[in-house]
Amino acid sequence: MNVAYDKIKDRLLEYKKKNIIVPTPKMIKTKEQIEGIRTAGVINTAILDMVGSKIKAGMSTDEINTLVHNFTIEHGAIPAPLNYEGFPKSVCVSVNDAVCHGIPSKREILKNGDIVNVDVTTIYNGYFADASRMYIIGEAKPNAIKLVNVTKECLELALKAIKPWETRLGDIGEIISAHAHKNGYTVVREIGGHGVGLAMHEDPYVAHIGKKGTGMLLVPGMVFTIEPMINEGGRSIFQDSRNGWTIYTMDGKLSAQWEHTIVITEDGCEILTH
Ligand code: MF3
Ligand code: CO
Ligand code: CO
């Protein structure tokens, strides 16, 4: 049934016998599926590029929503967040101490020095791609710029380390948390990366903390996101009780996040949202 899984089934069984957690058939995408997710990724990246060219001080986060929504539709795609479990907008925009799941609003105006995460998930021809970037509005303080850069490094270090049939999900968590902690930051634990491709959120869950040599083995054909949320202060967070979505840092300090959708390949990983 799943030709991609069938090809590696026996090899996976060898690892399973050694008590290593291995992916299920659903987690191994076929060539055709990866091609579909790659195309969704190209549109997703174009959206993030477009946001980068337009985002500026004085703009409301709802204007970003309008830009993302219209661009997505014009390209024959669907913004996955809209109506997802009741989410009311087409993109998540999370400013400063907002960790993630920020709901765009006409009342939230971007100002000089803000750090803004824009998280875009696009459906094209039934396939999903998910990525986010940080945008710095005008001139931010050095501490804010450092947080944004270190968070990006956390994601890049994890991506660089991936080797199929060797790297485990726990390795990704350890690499990210080690780099964050080395810089005096904390890692959000309650929310993580996820399988993606045929739906917005699939198994496995990808934690951004962990221990090397533990967790699921990474093998070719797996498609998932890595999306570290790194806090300048404590790791505690809370959910906005008024909108039921937006997550904030408990101490009001800054949080940053970068996200890519990747596919595990024969010799490492390929970023599908570059
Ligand atoms: N893009 C987010 C993620 O990285 C999920 C968006 S939740 C939604 O998993 F409700 F806004 F869609
Ligand atoms: Co996302
Ligand atoms: Co995601």
Image (cartoon, rainbow, N blue to C red):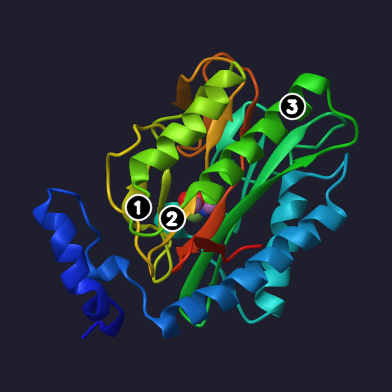
Q: CA distance from mark 1 to mark 2?
A: 6 Å
Q: Is residue 87 visible?
A: no
Question: Image quadrant for the C terminus?
Answer: bottom right
Name the disc covering residue 35, or none. Answer: none
- The local secondary structure at tag 1 comes to loop
Is residue 168 found left or right of 177 in the rendered image?
Answer: left
Q: What type is the residue that disc 1 sits on?
A: Glu
Q: Nearer the viewer, mark 3 or mark 1?
A: 1
The answer to whether marks 1 and 2 mark residues whose Cβ atoms lie closer than 8 Å is: yes
State the image quarter where residue 29 is shown: bottom left
Q: Earlier in the sequence, mark 3 or mark 2?
A: 3
User: Circle 3 is placed at which residue position?
Assistant: 146
What amino acid is at disc 2? Lys
The CA span between labels 3 and 1 is: 32 Å
In the picture of the structure, the residue carrying the numbered disc 1 is 166
Residue neighbourhood size for the residue with mark 1, other residues' Cα within 10 Å, grouped as few (<14), some (14–19), many (≥20): few
From the top left corner, tell me how far across and down residue 60 is, in percent.
Answer: 78, 44
Q: Depth-wise, is mark 3 or mark 2 nearer the camera? A: 2
